[in-house]
Image: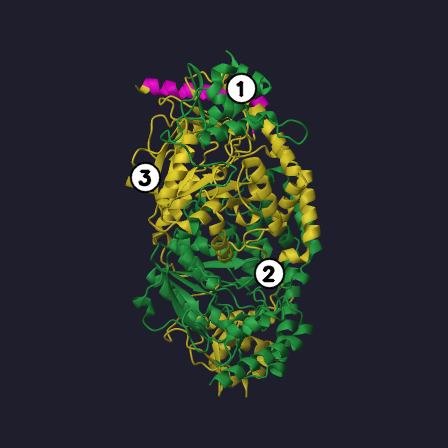
Chain colours: A yellow, B green
């Protein structure tokens, strides 16, 4: 066989010469790409017979093995097919020329932007605001600088040491048994939660715990009650799962279910943060707790109790979890380590009634599939060694001081009418402001001064005049800054009011 | 005020005496629990006036401050209310006696089990089988003992050192920029993926990447095509989001879309593993790749390309990703580190068209919220330092040896008719078996010998006679064991066939 015998193909395959020398791609790869591109662009049409490997290798000055490898590769990919007469170009698409040029500019494709997105994603709006550098008063962030990093790192080191190779593989999808045991014990002692380790599921933070609850017990179209104002993450979790979200107002005693609501809009799920309502700080009264559980039992509903920051109670004894008020409570108890330890740990949990635990385990195995085992072992070690309780105690004292200092700074320096809403717990205070000082404008103005308080109106589902104010997170902002920061907020608020006056 | 003035209450409050001495609960807590229980059980009815703090403190022999603290606590919880005449028991529930006894046996509550679960969770079946000790031939598990633990741990240590306190907080919900950059570069070089770091979203493994894709572009009721046989996790992800799953058959050239399917059942999503179909190992031919992308463009569909183990190609050059075949391909490219590194790392990713990246970021922020930042930084370090590529190279060579050894063991020792399905990649071989040797029985029998191959039929959506066999994962099973293990499998298979014969 001479070179002439494959002349129709030779143009494509032989010219230009392959690049040689240092820095050049391996010859085999150059040939592969050249041949693939020629087929894709139609320069080598379907059915076209390729030269034998030996003459082509000679013509190109490469080894015969390289050519054989390229032919095999392109056969595996479906560009070539072996036939009795040698190797041929395969039929790619109706025999026509393909308008696609790999590694080159393509003809304009239909614009992606014109395709509709999912209805779900259109409904999801950003509730958290820009994650820029501003951080003073940002709600939901604990005192990062006070986190006992060396102790935590020791727990991480021990987890790697003890866990070893076995911990690289898939584990229990509901979480490391050691962590679930330590957590069950902690929750029983600290929060009065009634559970065994089997009922504890470790999740990707509280948000994934909510998603798990929804998947377990709710169907599309089911009604979910949420607190208004309230944690918008719950709304997102429910809307992402196509539930119908019904806002229920909150007053000074927490979730205030209107007369007749259980019959008019019977919920499948009721979301509440009874120990320290987010963001108003109200404590759900005992009467309402009992009524809520009784009605939930009667209507086959489930209560999601989000106990997000109840470890930090600053006045009196800890308020026990609703879940522990009765055996077999219809309560899915959700918590997180984002506030008690640090947000990027991204571990949360849900305590489920025993009857749901098995299904949850299957669901977790088929969806999230467990994982993060070294971090979970580190956390178990951190709890068992007593570091966790010590850290909680230190933070409780710190946040108590910070809340007191913030209350004082507000009383002294916030020179517009305002009301500090109930809150003897946690890491934030909510300040109601008069309607002529729109909270979103104030929050926006504050960003220029490195402050990131959340506007109270962002937590509202229904427009309400009293839902105007600022949620001031003091967890990660040092007391010494409060006077200056509050003075600044006060000046900004007065400015806004002045503008409102001039407009009126 | 004398003790006599609160006689109706004294029984409840004064008897039995509070416990004192070492080991006893603090007096204040005892009083709190006693009072709360008395109110909950109705022994202290609504409206009942409580004694003043001073006389009660004297009668109980506790400090007055303790009584005041208990009253305040129970007022905060809503059990008591201050009135002009002193402190009274609040109205809890219609004034009736509450049948709930905290910390004691409760009256039988409606059984949880009788409540319906969500339809979604009923649909989710366990596809992975029991996670017991058996591990030989388990698919999807890489060579854990060969993982370079010391090098990884060094990357973890550096991440903690460099990340410091700033890394404790919330980060970019799409993942650490350093990791997204390193990954974009790796994917471009190793897989021919066209992307910038902005298009890369870090997720909780591939499964969460699938969930993200669904949330982004699909609505409930939309049709999703899945490979049959294929990865059941895709089916789970789609069914959990209420999509309609349509099985599409797979042959030796991968996903084989039947004539007319695009019009009869137009999909919103097409799931495929083109580089190494799971579990058959087929490579999606070039013609089909192009046709699939063209049809997807024409019908406004999205292709999810799951490139789960394509880093490990054992013959010829790597087969490039479909995503890279053309600019603006309608492809959501999904991958995972569970196979290339280790499963419990639980990090995966999806490369999205630029037009979808912004929405994905919002969605991630509102749902998963990022996190696991130290592990992401460790992974970025592992990639940047070249350890990742070196590990991939070592594993590619190891798996190549293991596949070869397994092919030889099967040829020599599997004494029933069988066919090894195409697969020049990855960490598993699929062996088709005759129908008189039911794969689920064989897999079950193998468990007694510490083997966990997956029955091929488990991957099938439609019942098909040729979907009978074993998926043998060789990633985490050493070559030296293959002859003995395959001999055992062969004996078990012959036993099963014998039983079938006797029955016939």
Q: Which mark is residue B390?
A: none
Find the magenta span and give its range.
A477-502
Closer to us: mark 3 or mark 1? 1
Within 10 Å of the Cα at label 3, are there few (<14), some (14-19), or many (20+) other Cα atoms? some
CA distance separating discs 3 and 1: 37 Å
For the residue pair B179 and A185, the one nearer the viewer reads as: A185
Q: Earlier in the sequence, mark 2 or mark 1?
A: 1
Residue at image mark 1 = B68
Q: Which mark is residue A262?
A: 3
Q: Which chain is disc 2 placed on?
A: B
Q: Which chain is disc 3 placed on?
A: A
Residue A233 placement (x, y as % from top left) = 44, 41
Verify whether residue A488 appears in magenta: yes
- Residue A272 at least partly seen: yes
CA distance separating discs 2 and 1: 62 Å
Residue at image mark 2 = B340
Residue at position x 63%, y 36% in the image: A389
**Element marked by disc 3:** helix
Within 10 Å of the Cα at label 2, are there few (<14), some (14-19), or many (20+) other Cα atoms? many
A246 lies above or below A164: above
Verify whether residue B137 appears in magenta: no
């Amino acid at each position: 066989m001479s070179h002439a015998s494959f002349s129709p193909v030779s143009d494509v395959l032989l010219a230009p010469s392959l690049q040689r020398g240092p820095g050049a791609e391996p010859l085999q790869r150059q040939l592969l790409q050249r041949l693939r591109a020629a087929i894709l662009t139609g320069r080598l049409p379907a059915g076209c017979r390729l030269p034998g490997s030996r003459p082509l290798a000679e013509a190109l000055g490469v080894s015969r093995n390289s050519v054989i490898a390229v032919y095999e590769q392109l056969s595996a990919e479906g560009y070539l097919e072996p036939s009795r007469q040698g190797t041929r170009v395969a039929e790619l698409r109706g025999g026509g020329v393909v308008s696609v040029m790999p590694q080159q500019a393509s003809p304009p494709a239909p614009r992606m932007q014109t395709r509709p997105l999912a209805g779900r994603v259109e409904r999801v709006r950003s509730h958290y605001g820009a994650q820029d550098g501003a951080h003073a008063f940002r709600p939901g962030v604990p005192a990062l600088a006070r986190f006992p990093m060396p102790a935590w790192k020791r727990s991480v080191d021990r987890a790697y040491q003890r866990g070893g190779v076995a911990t690289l593989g898939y584990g229990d999808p509901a979480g490391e048994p050691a962590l679930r045991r330590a957590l069950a014990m902690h929750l029983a002692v600290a929060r009065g939660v009634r559970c065994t380790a089997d009922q504890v599921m470790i999740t990707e933070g509280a948000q994934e715990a909510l998603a798990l609850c929804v998947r377990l017990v709710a169907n599309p179209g089911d009604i979910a009650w949420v607190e208004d104002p309230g944690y918008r993450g719950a709304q997102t979790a429910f809307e992402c799962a196509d539930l119908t979200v019904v806002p229920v107002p909150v007053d000074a005693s927490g979730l205030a279910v209107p007369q007749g609501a259980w019959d008019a809009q019977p919920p499948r799920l009721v979301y509440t943060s009874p120990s320290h309502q987010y963001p108003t700080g109200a404590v759900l009264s005992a009467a309402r707790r009992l009524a809520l559980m009784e009605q939930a039992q009667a209507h086959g509903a489930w209560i999601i109790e989000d106990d997000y920051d109840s470890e930090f109670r600053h006045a009196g004894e800890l308020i026990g979890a609703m879940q522990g008020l009765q055996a077999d409570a219809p309560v899915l108890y959700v918590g997180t380590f984002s506030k008690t330890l640090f947000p990027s740990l991204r571990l949360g949990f849900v305590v489920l009634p025993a009857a749901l635990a098995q299904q949850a385990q299957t669901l977790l195995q088929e969806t999230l599939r467990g994982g993060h085992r070294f971090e979970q072992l580190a956390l178990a070690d951190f709890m068992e060694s007593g570091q966790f309780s010590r850290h909680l105690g230190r933070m409780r004292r710190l946040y108590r001081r910070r809340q007191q200092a913030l209350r004082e700074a507000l009383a002294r320096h916030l020179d517009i009418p305002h009301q500090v809403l109930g809150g003897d717990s946690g890491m934030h205070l909510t300040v109601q402001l008069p309607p002529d000082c729109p909270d979103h404008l104030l929050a926006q103005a504050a960003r220029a001064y490195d402050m990131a308080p959340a506007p109270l109106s962002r937590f509202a589902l229904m427009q309400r005049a009293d839902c105007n104010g600022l949620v001031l997170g003091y967890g990660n902002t040092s007391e010494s800054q409060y006077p200056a920061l509050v003075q600044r907020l006060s000046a900004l608020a007065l400015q806004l009011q002045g503008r409102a006056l001039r407009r009126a």
